[in-house]
Image (tube, rainbow, N blue to C red):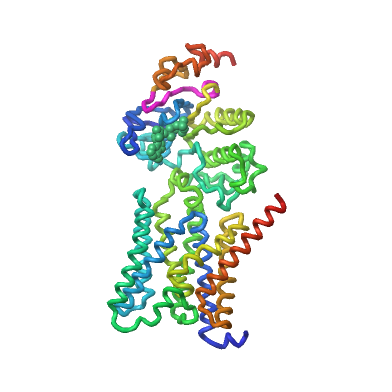
């Protein structure tokens, strides 16, 4: 069984406005794709298409050649924002366990606890979800996506409100998971992205995507439509590649 | 007080109150955590159309109410799948449609619609044995389905979007949940009536929410609170010769206020 992800001519509209235009993308198994782009560029929309939450207006979305609707149990999704009710009577452990609903495989509770430990929320397991800080909640969301043992992991700004120490361990964990899991990650943290991903795409309605992890000035300029050196700290060309080599 | 239990009507009312509290506490918990009070109001008020139809056709009004509340639940769960931005307005219409139809049917019905008031405001002291069996059957259905789909219902009420990414049949699960709300409405009509039942459905769960740390706990506390209010309402109304439905609801509201004050006070002290 193969788990490559494929989008063919995918377009998404909200009402009359075109949000994603003619996206073509093929993500191989155990790929690590980073997606960057300006606010409102459609990154979250793209991940929602990949998780089957949004049906595109046209085009096809498949995993391993099969329609996404039938393959949802392979996908783990970490949303950008929590979509739940904060005063729901539920603790952290129960929320994380929910990630296993409808999934194949039967990891035992030890593995759930291990997952909590990795995300450094083991001590919070009995805490009510509404009592957590923003960053703690984000860790719960990541843990919830991981316990289902996904073959494809979609992360929407997973480290946006996480402190740098945990953020670093999240990326280390992702690199380890990547040995057996396809990862598609949206982030504004170009530095972190360039350090950890294998390939990069820039999304602003259209997807600019090359088979390398190098970000070119042209890619950024066409995506962000603003002076690149804002992003690249004044070193226009290949700055991210350079950054990478320096590590 | 023991003497009271010599009367069949009181024993029936006592049993019906406890059985109705079970359905009410379980389903009310979902209504409160998912904040679908308005939807539940639509489902319950539209049942009045069925009451009227029952009178008009000369069949048991509760049967008519069942048809109407189940249909309203079906229509509302269909509306949700369409992501209609006017969902609220349409539910409001459904609500008024049922009530108007009920009034219309009753105006067509010759003679005096004697215990109409008991469907609007409840009269548990007149519940016949046959209706106790109906309430029992509905309890069994609710307990079985909730036990079977507990985790699924938890997922869709806690985080609907995430439940969709898990591949759960969210729309179907909501359809089932709304059907259970419709059944609970039927259970509560005799107890407190169509107008007041939304209060009994939600107040015990709202009180329980002050203390519960899990959905299961919320359900148990809600059932307990509901039993306390209905039973004490029953005694008060009997001894003081007050309407049962109003007594139960006024007690529940008093209970909510006391619990709210207690929680606020406690949090202030330890904050
Ligand atoms: N539910 C919605 N209804 C209408 N328009 C929407 C909806 N969700 C998003 N949009 C629009 O779609 C566009 C893309 O939104 P999206 O959330 O995908 O952007 P993003 O790249 O994730 O941005 P950010 O970096 O701020 O997270 C935006 O212009 C937004 O206004
Ligand atoms: Mg976004």
Q: Position of residue A176 (x, y in %)?
A: 57, 29
Answer above or below: position of B241 versus A61.
Answer: below
Q: Position of residue B227 (x, y in %)?
A: 57, 71
- Quarter holding the N terminus of chain A is top left
- Location of residue B137 in the rendering, given as x and y in whole percent from the top left corner: 45, 72
Which quarter is ligand 1 in? top left
Quadrant of the image for the C terminus of chain A? top right
Q: Position of residue A131 (x, y in %)?
A: 62, 46
Q: Which segment did they paint magenta?
A: A192-207
Whether residue B244 is visible, yes or no, is yes
Residue A195 part of the magenta segment = yes
Which of B231 and B237 lies nearest the eye of the viewer?
B237
Q: Is residue B71 left or right of residue B9?
A: left
Residue A197 or residue B66, whichever sits in front: B66
Residue at x 41%, y 26% (from the top left corner): A203
Choose top left, top right, bottom left or bottom right for residue B114: bottom left
Q: Does the segment drawn in magenta span residue A198?
A: yes
Q: What residue lies at 43% left-to-right and 22% top-to-bottom?
A: A224
């Amino acid at each position: 069984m193969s788990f490559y992800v494929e989008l063919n001519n995918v377009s998404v509209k909200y009402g009359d406005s075109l949000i994603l235009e003619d996206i073509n993308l093929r993500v191989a198994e155990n790929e690590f794709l980073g997606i960057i782009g300006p606010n409102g560029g459609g990154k979250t929309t793209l991940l929602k298409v990949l998780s089957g939450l949004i049906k595109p207006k046209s085009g096809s979305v498949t995993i391993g050649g099969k329609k996404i609707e039938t393959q949802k149990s392979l996908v783990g999704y970490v949303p950008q924002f929590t979509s739940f009710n904060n005063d729901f009577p539920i603790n952290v452990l129960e929320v994380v366990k929910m990630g296993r609903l409808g999934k194949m495989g039967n990891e035992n509770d030890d593995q759930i606890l291990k997952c909590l430990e990795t995300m450094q929320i083991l001590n919070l397991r009995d805490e009510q979800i509404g009592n957590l800080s923003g960053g703690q909640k984000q860790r719960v969301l990541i843990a919830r996506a991981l316990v289902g043992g996904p073959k494809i992991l979609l992360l929407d700004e997973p480290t946006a409100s996480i402190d740098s120490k945990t953020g670093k361990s999240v990326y280390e964990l992702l690199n380890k998971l990547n040995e057996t899991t396809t990862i598609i990650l949206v982030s504004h943290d170009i530095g972190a992205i360039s350090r950890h991903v294998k390939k990069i795409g820039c999304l602003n309605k259209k997807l600019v995507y090359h088979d390398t992890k190098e970000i070119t000035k042209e890619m950024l300029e066409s995506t962000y439509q603003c002076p690149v050196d804002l992003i690249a700290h004044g070193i226009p060309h290949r700055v991210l590649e350079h950054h990478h080599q320096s590590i | 007080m023991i003497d009271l239990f010599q009367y069949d009507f009181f024993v029936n009312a006592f049993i019906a109150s406890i059985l109705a509290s079970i359905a009410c506490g379980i389903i009310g918990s979902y209504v409160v955590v998912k904040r679908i009070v308005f939807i539940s109001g639509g489902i319950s008020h539209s049942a009045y159309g069925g009451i009227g139809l029952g009178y008009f056709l000369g069949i048991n009004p509760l049967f008519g109410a069942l048809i109407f509340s189940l249909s309203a639940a079906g229509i509302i769960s269909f509306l949700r799948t369409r992501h209609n931005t006017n969902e609220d307005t349409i539910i409001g219409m459904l609500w008024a449609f049922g009530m108007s139809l009920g009034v219309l049917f009753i105006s067509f019905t010759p003679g005096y619609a004697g215990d109409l008031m008991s469907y609007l405001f409840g009269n548990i002291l007149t519940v016949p044995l046959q209706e106790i069996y109906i309430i029992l059957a509905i309890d069994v259905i609710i307990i079985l389905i909730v036990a079977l789909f507990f985790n699924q219902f938890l997922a869709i009420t806690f985080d609907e979007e995430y439940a969709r990414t898990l591949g759960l049949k969210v729309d179907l699960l909501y359809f089932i949940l709304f059907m259970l709300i419709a059944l609970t409405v039927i259970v509560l009509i005799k107890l407190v009536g169509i107008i007041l039942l939304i209060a009994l459905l939600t107040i015990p769960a709202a009180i329980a929410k002050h203390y519960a740390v899990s959905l299961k706990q919320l359900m148990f506390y809600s059932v307990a609170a509901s039993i306390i209010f209905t039973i004490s309402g029953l005694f008060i109304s009997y001894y003081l010769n007050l309407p049962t439905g109003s007594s139960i609801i006024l007690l529940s509201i008093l209970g909510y206020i006391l619990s709210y004050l207690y929680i606020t006070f406690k949090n202030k002290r330890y904050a």
